[in-house]
Image: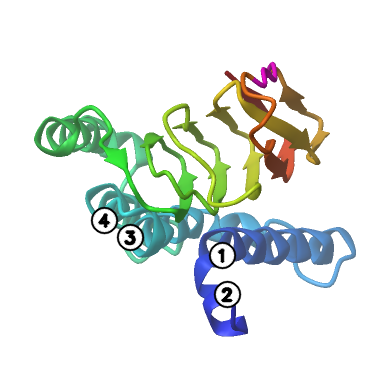
Amino acid sequence: MTLESGVKRARGPLIVGVVFIVIGTFLLLEQLGVVPRGFTLHFWPTIFIVIGLVKIAYAGGRAAGMAFIAAGVLVQLNEMNVIHVRLWDLWPLVIIIAGAAMLWYALNGSKPALSAIPQFDVFYIFGGGERQVGTQNFQGARLMAVFGGYKVDMRRADLDGAQAVIEASAVFGGGEILVPESWLVVLEGMGIFGAYEDKTRHIQTDAAQPVKTLVVRGAAVFGGIEVKN
């Protein structure tokens, strides 16, 4: 895998990581007196703009992404005194966004299709989703949720070889991974103010067949990752 393709595959967590670093840096500069107190707070609405961009670019949530961007721009302009609107006056936006989300789900949301893709990435921010994997040559996956969650059902899948790796992480969110009982799960994740748990049972029905091993690694920060049957 080239560096360019690796960055492209991880662009969701990369953007979130950069945002956290920038916010933390400005807060630290405020604490040290380098920038005026309250400077960072004037730009807090840009968080919604970043969330919207991530949803459009990576998570596939175009409608929700545009709603986040529109709300972020309006509130930021208000913070900069370009427009003068009380935040309470914008409360109907909540109803509009909720209605748009329900309409989007009604038109596009259904029972998750059985995916035959051997390798995939999922990234959710302020949202979540479910994926059912049925491929018989699964190779690996990257799962990430920030203020959201995911569920991946792999009980009808099989590995392409003896071993595959899933990188599963969550920040202020959670994830659930369902695997066949015939797979041996090796957990290499860690919980930071959270939990990273293996609740699977391994049953080798045919001793003549090689053991299929799934390695799950990552981190759960203020959240939880659970692997089970």
* Element assignment for label 2: helix
Q: Position of residue 63 (x, y in %)?
A: 22, 50
Rendered residue at 67%/21% (across/down): 204
Tell which circle, 2 or 4, labels the residue nearer the N-terminal end. 2
Q: Amino acid type of disc 1? A: Ala
| Mark 2 to mark 1 CA distance (whole Å) | 5 Å
On the image, the x and y values in percent for residue 219 come to 74, 42
The residue that mark 2 highlights is: 7
Disc 4: which residue: 66
Q: Which residue is at the front of the view, 134 or 39?
A: 134
The reply to whether residue 222 is visible in this rendering is: no
Quickly name the residue at label 1.
10
Crowding at dot 4, Cα within 10 Å, few <14 / some 14-19 / many 20+, comes out as some
In three-dimensional space, the C-alpha distance between marks 3 and 4, rounded to whole angstroms, equals 8 Å
Is the residue under label 4 in contact with that under label 1 (CB below 8 Å)?
Answer: no
Q: Determine the image quadrant of residue 211.
A: top right
Segment colored magenta? 200-204
